[in-house]
Amino acid sequence: MITAENLAKSFGDRVLWQGLDLTVEAGQTVALVGASGSGKTTLLNCLGLLDRPSGGRILYEGADLTRLGSGGRRRFRRDRLGYLFQDYALIENATVRTNLDVARRRGARPGHAAALERVGLAGREGEVVHRLSGGERQRVALARLLVKRPSLVLADEPTGALDADNAAMVVEVLRQLGREGCAVVVATHNDGVRAACDRAFDVGTGREAAPSGPASPP
Ligand SMILES: Nc1ncnc2c1ncn2[C@@H]1O[C@H](COP(=O)(O)OP(=O)(O)OP(=O)(O)O)[C@@H](O)[C@H]1O
């Protein structure tokens, strides 16, 4: 589904990685692990076309994303991609409903109620996001993914600020999206999140990593 091929990234003289090869198939969940500063967020940003690699290619269903112009990049992000950030990336002054509407594909059925029910926020469409707790905001962001049904989800420390119950909800929904055929890439320092993924990839070494030891709750 998505392949980073011989990918390199430098900031000035600082080489983050080079010769990085990673393929994530549809239906797979992959944890990006590695020391702080190894470039997990930067790799997510390259895969999500928010940043450009210094070298190499990113192939999505055979097409080279690094060669897309601005319109193609925008369409890829709009039609294929779902992002989940630690800081939720919601429209804070808008209602839950408006935030979910943003994700809706043209002509598609909304499915708001089912998505909100899935994340334990049934009936909360009319509430303004900035009044919600952190865990509730992340669950709105999850509901937005469920409404959008992207084929590729990129998640950056999505459980970092959450308590155990909310973190478990995030992991469960990401795994559900994987089972439904989405490719899911999660940058994480959390052993529980890593263990819940099908594979782990160490951005620091550029190699597959063993699933973490204890399958403790995230
Ligand atoms: N725009 C930028 N300009 C210069 N350096 C940058 C830029 N973005 C990131 N970096 C540097 O690249 C390195 C990797 O950053 P990145 O956030 O990708 O690491 P990370 O593995 O996600 O770290 P963490 O686990 O701490 O979140 C860091 O040293 C960071 O300072």
Image (cartoon, rainbow, N blue to C red):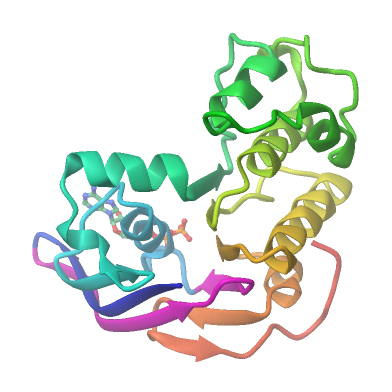
Q: Position of residue 22 (x, y in %)?
A: 40, 80
Q: Position of residue 96 (x, y in %)?
A: 70, 19
What secondary structure predominates along the stretch shown in magenta? strand
Ligand 1's quadrant is bottom left
Locate residue 2: give its quadrant. Answer: bottom left
Q: Position of residue 208 (x, y in %)?
A: 50, 89
- Whether residue 17 is in magenta: the answer is yes
- Whether residue 202 is in magenta: the answer is no
Q: Residue at the spot x=87%, y=28% of the render?
A: 121
163 in relation to 132, above or below:
below
Locate residue 212: give its quadrant. Answer: bottom right
Q: Position of residue 134 (x, y in %)?
A: 72, 30
How many numbered circles are shown?
0
- Seen from the viewer's position, the closer of residues 192 and 128 is 128
- Seen from the viewer's position, the closer of residues 127 and 108 is 108
- Seen from the viewer's position, the closer of residues 215 and 125 is 125
Q: Residue at the spot x=68%, y=80% of the render?
A: 198
187 in relation to 120, above or below:
below
Q: Quadrant of the C terminus?
A: bottom right
- Seen from the viewer's position, the closer of residues 200 and 182 is 182
Q: In this image, 124 relative to 87: left or right?
A: right
Find the magenta span and give its range: 13-33
218 in relation to 210, above or below:
above
Q: Residue at the spot x=15%, y=59% of the render?
A: 67
Q: Residue at the spot x=68%, y=65% of the render?
A: 178
Q: In this image, 43 relative to 171: left or right?
A: left
Name, please, the residue furthest toward the front. Answer: 107
137 in relation to 195, above or below:
above
Q: In this image, 149 relative to 143: left or right?
A: left
